[in-house]
Image: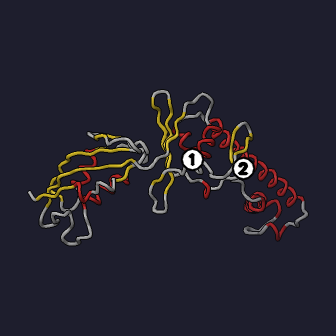
Amino acid sequence: MARELTIINQELRTNFMANATIQAHYDLAPGAVFEDEFSIVSFEAILFYIIAVSIWTLEKIFDDHKTWMAVKEFELKPWNLPSLVANAKKFQLGDDLVYQDDAYKYATIDEELQIVKLASASEVGNIVVLKVAKLNGSGEPEQLSDPSELTPFVTYIKLLKPPGVKLSIVSRPADLLKIYYRVYINPLVMNDSGELLSDTSVKPVEDAINAYCKGLNFNGVFSVTELTDKIQQATGVSNPVFESAASKYGLTPYAAINDYFTPNAGYFQIDEDFPLSATITYLVP
């Protein structure tokens, strides 16, 4: 970043006054101050000002060039999955794009209008699938409203994408989960309702399952093994035994999850019709 002109000028003067050869030539005492020895209209003062302006101008040119290079690097970056995700998150609801320097862009960046907080892109056959979501007031993923939010977002992406790219944009309610476990407990710590004896408001197994689902990256892979490991680590659990899990989205029927599963919407939530309090059985060894 270019220094201020006054700072550059003062640095030149200070170095000049500190030079032993200059001190001897001008008969200057060590520690003398430039302003006390030279007039502001002296040859030396004018020379240093001209040099300072030249240095300041050069530093400004370097700054402008660096900014230009950064912009060009972004504009010329090949269209790939990470750049698609990055552009999705830059969508500004209600703001129009302008065509400038051979690219569509926003005249002003306004983060308050950037509603897409979660995005993931992947290739399925010859189609690029872009999944997006916003966050509700509780910080939970939520689909874009259709058509007030989704329609302008789709238009935005289509303007930015290269021609010929087949794109499917997905923004749906959470995939629903139902999970069944038999959990053997330590009866000294937990009761057969899954509550801690020390604090019955705490249900470690349910908390572990909910934390696992919420902790998955957007469009992350649900793993039965990883979930079982998380339950195993919960306070009061002796041995969790997986029975079954299934997921659905929209009006589709439930499909079993045997090992791994990637949510169609990009995120999960436990089906309220199959609460964990009803699908987990607690047993004493």
Question: What residue do we see at 12% from left, 57% from top?
Answer: 283
Q: Position of residue 154 (x, y in %)?
A: 59, 42
The three-letter amino acid code for the residue at tag 2 is: Ala
Residue 156: quadrant of the picture: top right
Q: Which residue is situated farthest in the front direction here?
A: 251
Residue 73: quadrant of the picture: top right
> Closest to the observer: 49 or 259?
259
Q: Position of residue 104 (x, y in %)?
A: 69, 41
Image-based side of 182 in relation to 70, left or right: left
Q: Secondary structure at mark 1?
A: helix
From this viewpoint, is residue 19 visible? no
Q: Position of residue 243 (x, y in %)?
A: 20, 46
Question: What residue do we see at 72% from left, 36% from top?
Answer: 102
Callout 1: 10 Å neighbours few (<14), some, many (20+)? some
Check disc 2 and report the residue beneath it. Answer: 107
Q: Which residue is situated farthest in the left direction here?
A: 285
> Closest to the observer: 100 or 213?
213
Residue 16: quadrant of the picture: bottom right
Image-based side of 163 in relation to 41, left or right: left
2 or 1: mark nearer the eye: 1
Question: What residue do we see at 25% from left, 62% from top?
Answer: 204
Q: Position of residue 128 (x, y in %)?
A: 51, 33
Check disc 1 and report the residue beneath it. Answer: 150
Colour style of the rendered protein structure = secondary structure
Q: Secondary structure at mark 2?
A: loop
